[in-house]
Image: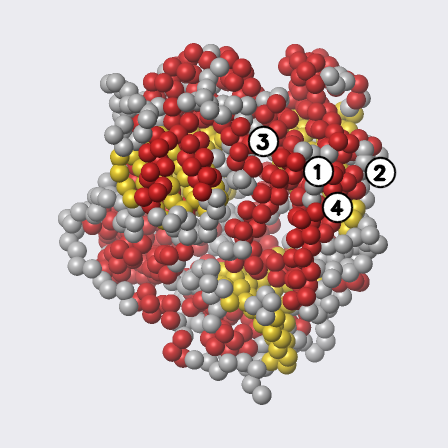
Amino acid sequence: MDLLPVESPEILGKNKRRFRSLKLVTVNDDDVLPEKPFGVDYGRLSNGLTYYVRCNSKPRMRAALALAVKVGSVLEEEEERGVAHIVEHLAFSATKKYTNHDIVKFLESIGAEFGACQNAVTSADETIYELFVPVDKPELLSQSISVLAEFSSEVRVSADDLEKERGAVLEEYRGSRNANGRMQDAHWVLMMEGSKYADRLPIGLEKVIRTVTPEIVKRFYNKWYHMHNMALIAVGDFPDTQGVVELIKTHFQNKTPAVDPPWIPQFIVPSHEEPRFSSFVESEAAGSAVMISCKVPVDELKTVKDYRNLLAESMFFHALNQRFFKLSRKKDPPYFSCSAAADVLVHPTKAYIMTSSCKQNGTTEALESMLIEVARVRFHGFSEREISVARSLLMSEIESAYLERDQMQSTNLRDEYIQHFLRDEPVVGIEYEAQLHKTILPHISANEVSRYSGNFKTSCSCVIKTIEPQAAATVDGLRRVVSRVNSSEEEGRISPWDDEKIPEEIVSVEPNPGHVVEQFEYSSIGATELVLSNGMRVCYKCTDFFNDQVLFTGFSYGGLSELEECEYFSCSMGPTIAGEIGVFGHRPSVLTDMLAGKRAEVGTSIGAYMRSFSGDCSPSDLETALQLVYQLFVTNLEPGEEDVKIVMEMAEESVRAQERDPYTAFSNRVREINYGNSYFFRPIKIGDLRKVDPFRACQYFSNCFKDPSTFTVVIVGNIDPSFACPLILQYLGGIPRPPQPIMNFKRDELKGLPFTFPSTVIREVVRSPMVEAQCSVQLCFPVELKYENMQMEDVHLTGLVSKLLETKILQILRFKHGQIYSAGVSVFLGGNKPSRDGNIRGDISVNFSCDPEISSTLVSLALDEIQRLQEEGPSNDDVTAILEIEQRAHENGLQENYYCLDKILRSYQSRIYSGDVGASFKIQDEGRTRVRSTLTPLTAQSALQRIIPFPCKKQYTVVILMPQSSLFKKLKSFIGSRDAKNIQKKSQILPAADFGWHCRCNSFRSMPMEILSKSNKIIGNGRAHTH
């Protein structure tokens, strides 16, 4: 009997054919793109407010709203520096209609979370307020629009309001004064020199934040916040647009336009022919880096010719970045990573940016290589093959967007209309964009693309900056590099690019297909499970969430916890070394070209108890993705000397960077206190790296992905079984099963980690040297869910309890006392091996940053609030809010492949799984439903007493990162500042000194971290995020 449908050739690639049948358009270069934004009810009220309203059902019963204001920090006067950002904070604090953070309470009550960087952003040129709200009840949309209407003209600026927000803004300011923040700020000033933008970073000045008066804030707000400077954008699952337009009119129409309001001035960023140089020394820098930024005017996007130029520019960056990646993987590379991009910095100016990360004392070599490469493009251009690869990448991107044009997220559409209002970017619709791509891309020549290298000439308002933890490069040395490269280009001494030979096929010999041994249908979850002839178990579920998405994950039990100490460090480096060689049978630099035009990605992970691979692909590229999985299992890795050398150099630089980071000693001590001093939790040091055996590392990695019989694979997405199942049989079923089992572990027999949480209270201060004072707090409680009493509900309950704690701690420390910017509560339940019996152990940790001088006071406030919740329980409103937040997240997740994949994986990995994934899925769903239906203030109180120690003050750990300081300052920090005393007085708690903090001065120790394959761009767009 046939268990699988027969392959249907006519279905093969149906999505691609749908795109390829899209008609070309007849256009001329000077044809003007439509000015009116596509697909939206667009207009302007009589008072000047612009509005955009669009119906969109992704996700269902949700709306993405925004109030975009053409007011940013560049409009501030000297005494106002930081006020644009303060206004944004005050908006969520109090308005004419809403007081005492009622807006935050409203958002939480409807499941629309409030948090750092979620609800608003201030930049040099604009401020944007954003809400993502449910609209399943008619009144919610009206109330949400009324909130934005309050922001537009009714923000309250009293002395009390301002005083309450100063602490949060100051903490955000303090958080920006780390190594990255200092480097960003310095580069911004260098780039904007000669312009008002140079002195108008959105975060502002500390002295202004501390001392600015309500009158100055109110003056700025009243001067610039006018209807003609604003737009209301609403995209969501509405019955029609007209009803939403009427709501906008109801809440905004009565706002009287100002008489002769000031128009927004334009500020010029001067150009310069001579390059500017900077050798920036940052003792806490994550490594050595080079940045080259060349300023050009922002391009207009008005005509078809402008659109063609935009495509050619995108092709240029694709092709250039491919070169950079290949150079970083050659013998003795000049840098570890390098990338290039264009970014609009401020309204009149955009920058062409190249950034690289390199080894210590290697910045001048990296700079020379970067300059030579763009000079090579200017002199020789790109090859036709490079252009073909870039063209394929762009065509693949637009194809995916076109196939999912009816499934675009409302937040993405909202962002397009925001940019239409703020920057006049046309919105022509995905279908027309796809037609333009198909019409124009084939005719863009290599010369058109290569000419964009001219924007990287050092005479093009160029700023060159090196960043080093210790001074090595000099400005004179950088000048000499520039002069040398320019001379080489002028004299024609730059050789052409040497292309690598690229294989035709990922799999050189097609595997013999396996067959299905057993097949199970789980109709309750719409999934099918196949047991293949090589022992692999495959479960697939067809969804229609996204037309161009298939996700999959395969996992097997057994990981790093099985290793002895003598092998641990070598084997833990296996993924890094293997990734450099190429785990899919081809070097990464070659594979990127082989995958051009295909949307298929596969990655691997090796954890304490599990190995896994995961993929994301287009349905039409499922074969390619499964070929990569097949290659993962059959590739025998053999490390070459150069491969190992590059990886170990990167690893050593990474460890040194961690040693420079003030947070390293803090993180290490947190780990040591909470999890013990086992080798598994110890940070990797340079000495450990030098003992790594690369052959053992690669052997271990290969063995992790060798035996298919140990793996369960879950596939979710737009799958056509008649097309997908033959591919599953060929590439997953075709993986050869080894004669003897390899790493065939039973989940109940795994070796557990040496995880021991302290049985008493431990309080410790870790002091690290810092350029500028930073303070971070981690408060941690042990969690142990008892096996004999435990139902699956306890796992769901722990998640809800952690959300309750996060909400209440934020209310106390931020909204009541105004002393933090944000707080996070995280849950870890991986302290035990994933066996079917035994207790579940882990911890719940509370994290926040704050003023060092009041850190111990805030810890006391947090502990008091947690103990109050244990003794008195939360309010009905508290419980309703967290249930609403959880429900809204669940509803959103039910429309996402990632969520569906995760739920099925959890069903397989659940301790109640016994061969029937449908039953396991059902039990978990029923557990969630029971928890929600029975959660009351009383049951929440009981859960808090059971899940964490009760009373909470009898067993916990607190580690506080503090700056190293003089003895006098240390004593002062224990006694507490005047601010701390005021908080203590208001809350009637014991002084911090009574807690007897143990002070620990630590030299840096490194900790394991993944080696980045991409450089972090240090230049930003001068944005300060809040909420």
The dot on residue 842 is: 4
Is residue 968 left or right of 230 when viewed as pictured?
Answer: right
Estimate the x, y position of residue 576 in percent, counting from the top left.
Answer: 60, 54
Say what amino acid the circle numbered 1 marks.
Answer: Pro
Q: Which residue is mark 1?
A: 937
Question: Which residue corresponds to the image point at 58% horizontal and 42% vertical from the top-left?
Answer: 885
The dot on residue 759 is: 2
Q: Earlier in the sequence, mark 3 or mark 1?
A: 3
Is residue 239 left or right of 544 when viewed as pictured?
Answer: left
In the rendered image of this protein, does residue 596 appear above or below residue 509?
A: above
Specify the quadrant of the image occupied by residue 403.
Answer: bottom left
Asked if one can make out residue 281 in the rendered structure from this viewpoint, the answer is: no
Q: Earlier in the sequence, mark 2 or mark 3?
A: 2
Is residue 650 left or right of 183 when viewed as pictured?
Answer: right
Question: Which residue corresponds to the image point at 75% horizontal and 46% vertical from the top-left?
Answer: 842
Is disc 1 placed on a helix, strand or loop?
helix
